[in-house]
Amino acid sequence: MPDRRTQLLDAALAVVADKGMKGLTHRAVDAAAQLAQGTTSNYFRNRAALVEAVLDRLEQLDGALLQDQGTAGPPRTIEELAGQLAALMLALAGENAALTRARLALSLDRPEAVTAGHFRLVGGLEQALTALGVSDAAARARDLADYGDGVLLHLLTVRRDAPPDAAAIAAAVRRLLAP
């Protein structure tokens, strides 16, 4: 069982995923965590402190997710990279959809707070593409990140009732990386 602080932050992420940033209150977090009223404010004295802690928790969970989705090493082929990215997008839109919704809500409310994580992702993609010999790796890494953001948004909104297609996502990634 997570410690109380982690329990509150996970509940706060669930609140943001469900109700957006306007729904993020100390009371809402207490209720989501099924704890006594006032518990959240004992750990996070004001909303700003709560939001900062939620952002830190999101980054921690994102890091763990990327590590869990990763392989033993960098991709050896474009095909392998495409498969990895498709699997990551399916995980972010599937079992981690609430985390993705929270990330989207936080990024709209506090874009500067998610910039570092975005640039880490793009930097990792750029390194992988450079190692694979892809020309203009920096621009293509940005394109892949943009495509991934769009796919996630659509999987969580306009295509939420359609089963995601890993093969189609991987094929689109391959097209983006074609010479």
Image (cartoon, helix red, strand yellow):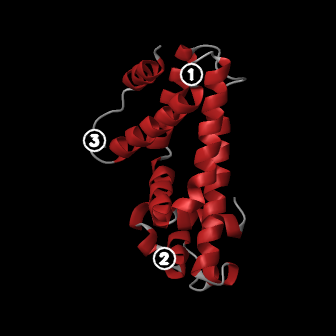
Mark 1–mark 3 Cα distance, whole angstroms, equals: 27 Å
In-front residue for pair 159/78: 78
| Residue 100 appears in the picture as rendered | yes
| Residue 94 appears in the picture as rendered | no
The circle on residue 164 is: none
Q: Position of residue 173 (x, y in %)?
A: 45, 24
The amino acid marked with disc number 1 is Leu
**Residue 80 against residue 94 in the figure, above or below:** above
Q: Position of residue 158 (x, y in %)?
A: 27, 45
Q: Earlier in the sequence, mark 2 or mark 3?
A: 2
Q: Earlier in the sequence, mark 1 or mark 2?
A: 2
Mark 2–mark 3 Cα distance, whole angstroms, equals: 28 Å
Q: Which residue is mark 1?
A: 81
How many neighbours does mark 1 have within 10 angstroms: few (below 14), some (14-19), or many (20 or more)? Answer: many
The circle on residue 28 is: 2
Q: Position of residue 7 (x, y in %)?
A: 64, 65
Tell me what residue is drawn at x 66 percent, y 84 percent.
45
Tell me what residue is drawn at x 44 percent, y 22 percent.
170
Q: Position of residue 87 (x, y in %)?
A: 51, 29
Q: Which residue is mark 3?
A: 161
The amino acid marked with disc number 3 is Asp
In-front residue for pair 75/3: 75
